[in-house]
Image (cartoon, rainbow, N blue to C red):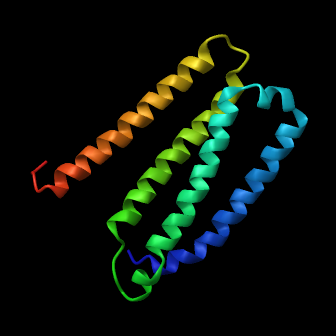
Amino acid sequence: MPLGPLASYFKLMWTGFWMNAASGVLLVVLFPVKAVTNPVFYLKMSGVVLSVLFLRRIRRQAFGASLESGGGVSQAARTSAILGLTVWVVTITAGRLLAYDEIADVEPQTAIATLITTVALVLGYLGIRRTRASGVAG
């Protein structure tokens, strides 16, 4: 599937991002103590920042000059996309965990399990990529 026509969706993505950012700021204003005293909130905010950085990087790598000149998508752009999606999964999960702060021991255990799973997925992906790059069948 050619990527060129998909570039127009960046405007839609940024619109969705800013709508979510506005509603998130409203929630923090309404319940500031619940947000700023919860370590999962900082995990979520870090994920949002990383995700935005990945999105900018993906746009530059996948929709930059190489695409305009007819070149394919680089491996760096593919890796950035996969890592960016992984960060979004962690960020969304962290956001959902914020609802469980009233249930003792559920939130910390789930946050740790999510972090371990994410690290395992990223390391597994990188291991598969390295194996394929070295020419070993797998």
Residue 46 image offset from top left, x and y in percent? 63, 43
Q: Is residue 95 visible?
A: no
Q: Nearer the viewer, residue 134 or 85?
A: 134
- Residue farthest to the top? 104
**Residue 21 horizontal side relative to residue 136, left or right:** right
Above/below status of 65 relative to 94: below
Residue 88 image offset from top left, x and y in percent? 55, 47
Above/below status of 33 relative to 13: above
- Residue farthest to the bottom? 69
**Residue 114 horizontal side relative to residue 37, left or right:** left
Which residue: 42% across, 31% down? 117
Quadrant in the picture for residue 72: bottom left
Quarter of the figure that contains the N terminus = bottom left
- Residue farthest to the right? 30
Which residue: 49% across, 51% down? 85
Q: Is residue 34 visible?
A: yes
